Amino acid sequence: MKHFSESALPLDHLAHNRLALAISLILGSVCYLTIKDVEAEDSVVVAERQEEPRPSAASFNIGAFSLMSMLGAPAPIYVTVTNGVGITSGALDSSSVILRAANATGVKASGTAAQISFEQGSVVNGAVTPATANGQKALLAEDGGKISGSGVRVEMLPQTAAGVNITANNMTGVTAQNGAVVNLDNSQVSMGSPAGSNNVGLLASGADSLINFSGGAVSTLAKGSVGVLAKDGGSIALSKGTTVSTSGTVSGSTISHGLKAEGASRISASDITVNTSGAAASGARAEGASEITLTDSTFNSTNAATTTTTTAVLHALGGSQISGSGLSVNASGNYVGGARAEASSISLKDSHINVTGSGVVSNPAAAARAMAGGSLVIDKSILAAQGTYGHGISVEGAGSQAQVSNSEISVLGARSIGLNITGGAQAQVSKSQIAVDALNGTGPWSPGVLVDGAGSSLVLSDSQVRTSQKTSYGISAGDGADIKISNGSVSTAGNYSAGISAGNATITADNVNVYTSGNDNAMGVVANLNATVILNGGTVTTSGDGSPVQSNLTFPHALASRNEGALLIANGTHLLTTGQQAYGAAVDDGGSMQLNGVSVKTEGDRSIGLYAGIGGPKPGSVVLEANSVTVETLGANAAGARVSRNFKDAQTATLILKDSSIRTHGDNSAALQAERGGQLQADNSVASTSGIGAHGVLVSSIPSSATLKQASVITQGADAHGMLVKDGGQLSAAQSTVSAAGDNAAALYV
């Protein structure tokens, strides 16, 4: 360094003037001067012009600290001893602490007598090697101590002299432990570096330990580094626009979560934003009987997990609770759901969850998920999922449950279910909408609602279920499940998409309106193998066509009961089909059906009103009983009631009418028909037809039979006989009347 004698300095009178020194430093920085030395408050900083690049960030910081000192701010405090401490007591507002040793602490309040004010203070990790950067703590309150401040800056982002990030591990920005308290407003906590690991922004540990952090920002960059961590009974409160950001990857089993509460701890947050981008990271994770309460906050997750590390933005496990109101939760990455209660509970109100990403069959990327005895309570919320196995709500396993009300659930993706209840789980859904759609034509598609497995149950009321894709059933129950539906509606638009279907399960629907518009097996309501379906009131409307290929045997019937042990009971339900080969009510292949006070109307050719038949591939005895039923068909070859055994000698096919009315409008549309060994019985009923060749009663082939008692048969049309028996069929009529009005029409023709 070049020193000038006193006689050589023309402005010697300014040498000890603070303002003059400050101005000289500013001018020196502009002129690319390098700071060479900093002495005591009244010392002169002498520098010489250098022909070299602009000073490094480290040199500039030294100059800044010198400038602060000369303007009256406290000189920075350097901690250069391992386990050393910069500040331990008092009001040290605007103080700056630079940590240059391992396990050093910037500000430490230890014991109930220690209360430190740190307004506008700063703590910086100034280490230049990984060893000296390790384990540093910026602010530490312990054993009842207290630290408070606003505008505090914590920068634990150490760099080498050349400005290269240092691998810094095990650092903590703000710590309250063993009953201590830290209060910070509008403060910044930055933790690094990307190559480091296990750094924490805010840490509250131990009973009665508390951190209040308001209106600031917390960020971590390192692997396995949590933004906000409460553990072992500690508590943290975040508010007023606080932002928490984590981006580190996994370090061993430690994940860079945004908020984490463990060991019976608590985190509360209002008006905050949490951003996570590290692998398998949750925005808020509660475990070990902990609690997280969230209000009016936003969570953004842009990370993915794996099939074995699946998680959710909000993840509660181990007997913990997460409750949220006014939340916006966004996840974009595979195997990351929106909210997941695992042996824990999550409640959401007035919230919006949006998940974009795929899962797998065993771990769906659901907007909301309860498993292993977990529970969900969702009210007045919107849940959306987009991706393969991206369910809307999934409730899995015995003891798991969900209560959903006044909410909207939508999914877009192959194999994605709107509401999935399996393995003995239970759910209650009211006043909600469930929709399954797709962005493209690639499937396969799943039901709007699926309840599957012994003990699984759903109570659905005043709600709407809608699907639009092929094979996407509206509501499906299987393998011992039970569903109770009241009011509301179910609609499907895809081919083969039944409205309500049960197999080896039970469904009861009261005053439910069912609509299907797909072709083939897009039936309204289906009772399949060993299932019982009961309809009380309501309507069933289908508008699709059956397959034009006769061998396909696919029909969009309003009601169907098929295969052994299937039973469908309808009381006071109104049925309407408007497509071709769309029967009103059909039983086949071992099914049975009871209709009481039901009205049936079909509008289409070959659309039979009531049908009981035995198919070739899966023969089984069938029976259809209709009491006080009205049937009307409009179309050619659309019989009012037909029974057919298909010559299966080991089975029987029976159709029984009591106190009913059957009317057909169309050519070759018989009112009552028994064929191929079927047996028909009509008591106190009316059968009428209008059309060419539309017989009142048609019995054909051995050993088909029809038995009428107190029946009335009326036909109007050419060649439309009142009763026609042929090919060995048998007819018995008692206390009945027959009228045939048409050319070549006989009352009885044998």
Image: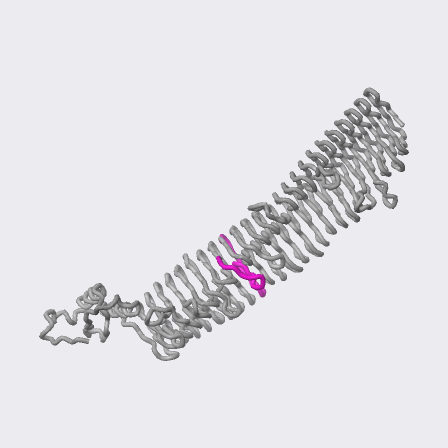
What is the quadrant of residue 686 in the picture? top right
Q: Residue furthest top?
A: 743
Q: Is residue 326 magenta?
A: yes
Residue 263 or 305: which is nearer the viewer?
A: 305
Please give the name of the residue rendered at 86% of the width and 24% of the height, measured from the top-left corner: 747
In this rendering, the answer to whether 136 lies above or below 396 is: below
Q: Quadrant of the N terminus?
A: bottom left
Residue 259 or 693: which is nearer the viewer?
A: 693
In this rendering, the answer to whether 398 lies above or below 102 is: above
Decide if residue 257 is in sight here.
yes
Q: Position of residue 576 (x, y in %)?
A: 70, 35
Residue 491 or 28: which is nearer the viewer?
A: 28
Left or right: residue 552 compared with residue 283: right
Q: Is residue 206 magenta?
A: no
Left or right: residue 11 compared with residue 615: left
Q: Position of residue 95 (x, y in %)?
A: 31, 70
Magenta-drawn segment: 302-327
Decide if residue 375 is in sight here.
no
